[in-house]
């Protein structure tokens, strides 16, 4: 049974409870991009600037950002509350930790060749290979 209308009403009620109409523009965004910046650390922006500095054009940079976001979201599906990642001695959990971990793996070339050198292309095939090679299958 589809419950979209009830969910929309519930969402609208929460927004109206917590924000006055004149404050709607102050509702903080929530999405994968914000997960990458958990703890107030900018992680995607320096990588984007590195790519710009290497002469990578805007269209290619957009493709790369979409790649890392899609891989991160796919890895996050069902990760649960107990998953944690430690970066520079700071432990971050849940979706934020998984976003940071997937970005770290992406930059290290775990899903294929690294984008960091400005030349290579990890693509989704590397991601699929990592998933398949780590499956525990029972017959």
Image (cartoon, rainbow, N blue to C red):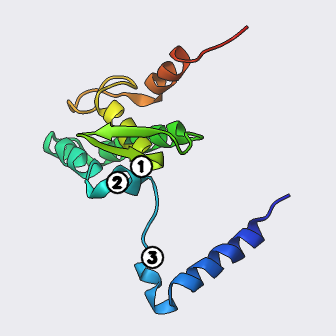
- Residue at (25%, 40%) from the top-left corner? 89
Task: Indicate the quadrant containing the C terminus: top left, top right, bottom left or bottom right.
Answer: top right
Among the 4 quarters of the image, the one containing residue 91: top left
Distance from label 3 to label 1 (Cα)?
Answer: 19 Å
Rendering coords of residue 116 (x, y %): 23, 33
Label annotation for residue 27: 3
Residue in the foreground of this view, choosing between 52 and 90: 90
Label annotation for residue 8: none
Task: Indicate the quadrant containing the N terminus: top left, top right, bottom left or bottom right.
Answer: bottom right
Query: Secondary structure under badge 3?
Result: loop
Rendering coords of residue 110 (x, y %): 36, 24
- Residue at (75%, 66%) from the top-left corner? 4
- Residue at (47%, 21%) from the top-left corner? 130
Describe residue 108's horizontal placement relative to residue 35 as left or right.
Answer: left
Describe residue 64's horizontal placement relative to residue 18 as left or right.
Answer: left
Callout 3 environment at 10 Å: few (<14), some (14 to 19), or many (20+)? few
Q: Is residue 24 above or below residue 113?
A: below
Callout 2 environment at 10 Å: few (<14), some (14 to 19), or many (20+)? some
The residue lying furthest to the right in this view is 1
Query: Secondary structure under badge 2?
Result: helix
Mark 1 sits on what residue? 96
Rendering coords of residue 123 (x, y %): 42, 29
Q: Earlier in the sequence, mark 2 or mark 3?
A: 3
Distance from label 1 to label 2 (Cα)?
Answer: 6 Å
Mark 2 sits on what residue? 38
Callout 1 environment at 10 Å: few (<14), some (14 to 19), or many (20+)? many
Q: Nearer the viewer, mark 2 or mark 3?
A: 2
Query: Secondary structure under badge 1?
Result: helix
Cβ–Cβ below 8 Å for labels 1 and 2? yes
């Amino acid at each position: 049974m589809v419950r979209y209308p009830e969910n929309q009403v519930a969402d609208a009620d929460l927004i109206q409870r917590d924000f006055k109409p004149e404050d709607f523009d102050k509702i903080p965004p929530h999405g994968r991009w914000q997960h990458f910046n958990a703890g107030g650390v900018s992680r995607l922006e320096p990588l984007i600037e590195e790519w710009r500095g290497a002469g990578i054009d805007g269209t290619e940079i957009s493709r790369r950002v979409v790649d890392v976001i899609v891989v991160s979201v796919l890895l996050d599906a069902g990760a649960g509350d107990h998953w944690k990642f430690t970066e520079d001695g700071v432990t971050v959990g849940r979706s934020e930790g998984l976003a940071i971990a997937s970005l770290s793996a992406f930059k290290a070339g775990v899903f294929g060749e690294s984008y960091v050198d400005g030349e290579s292309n990890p693509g989704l095939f590397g991601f699929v290979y990592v998933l398949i090679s780590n499956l525990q299958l029972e017959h």
